[in-house]
Each structure stands twice: as C-alpha cells, then as structure tokens.
Image (cartoon, grey):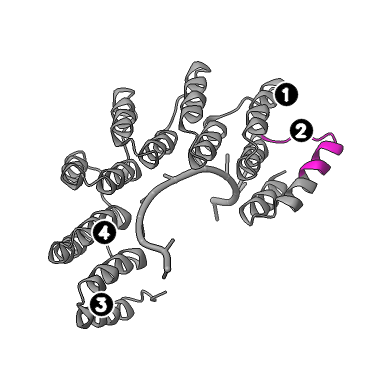
Amino acid sequence: LTALSTLLNLLVEAGRLDLAEEVFADLRNLRLVPSACIFNIFIKFHCKAGNFEKGFEILEEMDRVQCAPNVISYSTLMGGLCRAGKLKEAVGVFEEMLKKGIVPDALAYDVLINGFCDAGNVNGAKKIFDMMKKNMCKPNNVNFSSLMNGLCKEGRSHEAFELLSEMLATGCRPDAVTYTILINCFCKEGRIEEAQRMIAKMKAGGCAPDIGTYNVLIGGLCREGKFEVVFGILDEMSRSGCVPN
RNA sequence: UCACGCGGCUA
C-alpha cells in the first residue's frame, strides 16, 4: 500500500486523474481497504476534480471502515474547498474536525488563514491566528508568513512588519519566504531602497536569499528602471550558485 | 532515513 500511495499521489499531482481513477477502481475491485494515507490522496483527487461531495463521502467511508479521518484528511479537504473559493464550507469542515475531537495542527490552521486571506478577509485570518494561540498551538514561520502576505496584499504592510517583530520576539525564525513577502511589499510600494536594506538584513540574520527572493527584487528594480543594479544582482546570484530561471 | 495536508515572484 505504501508503493501504491506513492504512485497514486504522483498521478494525482501530475493531473493524470484518468489513470488515478483506474488505480482507485482496481483497489475497490480487489476489495482492499485503503490506508488513511490513500484515503487522503483520494480526497485530494476529488478536490482536484471539483467533486467536493465525493470528498465528504470519503470522510464518511473512513468512519465506516474504522479508519477514522485524521488531521490531514480534514486539512486536505479544507484546502481544496478554499482553493475553489468555498471558504464557508471549509470552515464547516474545520468545525466538524473539532467536534470529532481532532486537534488541529499549525498546518491545518494555516489552510484556513490562507483561505481567509484569499477571500479578502484578512481580519478573519487574524482571528484564526489568534485562535491557534489561544488553543496553545504555537504559530510557526509559515503561519506568520501567510498572515503577513495577506496583510501586505491588502496594503496593510505596517501590520505585517509588526508581525515580524512579534515573530522575532517569540523566537520564531523568518525564512527566505518570510523575507521575500516583505521585500515584495516594499517593491510594490516603490520602496526599492528599503527592499535592498531588507535583503541585507536577511543575510545578516543568516538567511540566504533564494531564487524567489531574487526574482522579486529584480522585478522591483526593473520597474524602477535600475537595470545596472539588476546585472549586479545576476552576478551575485551566479556567485552564490543560485541559477536564474 | 520511505508515502498523504500549508506560505513568497511567475511575464
């Protein structure tokens, strides 16, 4: 079943839902009871196909066959619903998970934080963020980054920078993505020199810019017409073994 | 030490 789950996941990820469907059918015909992992891939499959009702049915089937849905099962379905703009339904799944006594982890909360942000409801995302703290689930760097990105997208960069301070104060280390979100924010606001200072700050903090960071910075510099600086950045990239894409 | 759920740029 482990080999099968690997295969199924690759098929679903590659968008070969037709082939995945066949494998799922074979599983059924062989009367094999899937593992929780395979059920979860099943849920992802239905989400990718837009069949959310089928996704809910998998949760019910898992209960029936004594393979209770876990936090990944619920997170997968929530993520699929959020991506389809069905935030209300995703929140419903989250509540059902709580009712079943399953404790959400940082990743489960993150799905909802991004769901609220993508729906243009950053205040809702902040409520989820506060909820996880109240429930003794310490926000990780991804949670901070998600919320910071939502704030920046709404033009609330000041609050995003406050979060960076909170992050550092709680001993949570920003990574390249965290910094890139803030650098992108500066670039979009035409504050290119502050973006460059942020790069210096991340390097000083022991965090190396990655390809995403450089791309954001290059975009910002180009918009400002600072092409000479861009060539310097490209040099720096090759020196640090970061291949431009 | 292996499989399933999150965050940044994408022209």
Q: Is label 4 in a helix, a strand or a loop?
A: helix
Identity of the residue drawn at 20% across and 83% down: A228
Q: Mark 2 or mark 4: which is in front?
A: 4
Of label 2 and label 4, which has the lower sequence position? Answer: 2
**Residue holding disc 1:** A65
Specify few, some or many for label 3: CA neighbours under 10 Å numbering under 14, 14-19, or 20 or more: some
Residue type of the residue flagged with mark 3: Ile
Please report the residue visible at 67 percent of the width from the left and 23 percent of the height from the top: A60
How many numbered circles does the render carry?
A: 4
Q: Are marks 1 and 2 in contact (CB under 8 Å)?
A: yes
Q: Quadrant of residue A26?
A: top right
Magenta residues span A24-35
Q: Residues within 10 Å of mark 1 (few under 14, many from 20)?
A: few
Distance in Å between CA atoms under marks 2 and 4: 47 Å
Disc 4 residue type? Answer: Asn
On the same chain, marks 3 and 4? The answer is yes
Q: Report the residue marked by disc 3.
A: A233
The quarter in which the N terminus of chain A is drawn is top right
Which residue type carries mark 2?
Val
Secondary element under disc 2, as helix, strand or loop, is loop
Which chain is home to disc 3? A
Residue corresponding to mark 2 = A33
Q: CA distance from mark 3 to mark 2?
A: 54 Å
Q: CA distance from mark 1 to mark 2?
A: 8 Å
Residue at the spot x=81%, y=42% of the render? A25
Q: CA distance from mark 1 to mark 4?
A: 48 Å
**Image mark for residue A245:** none
Q: Which residue is mark 4?
A: A184
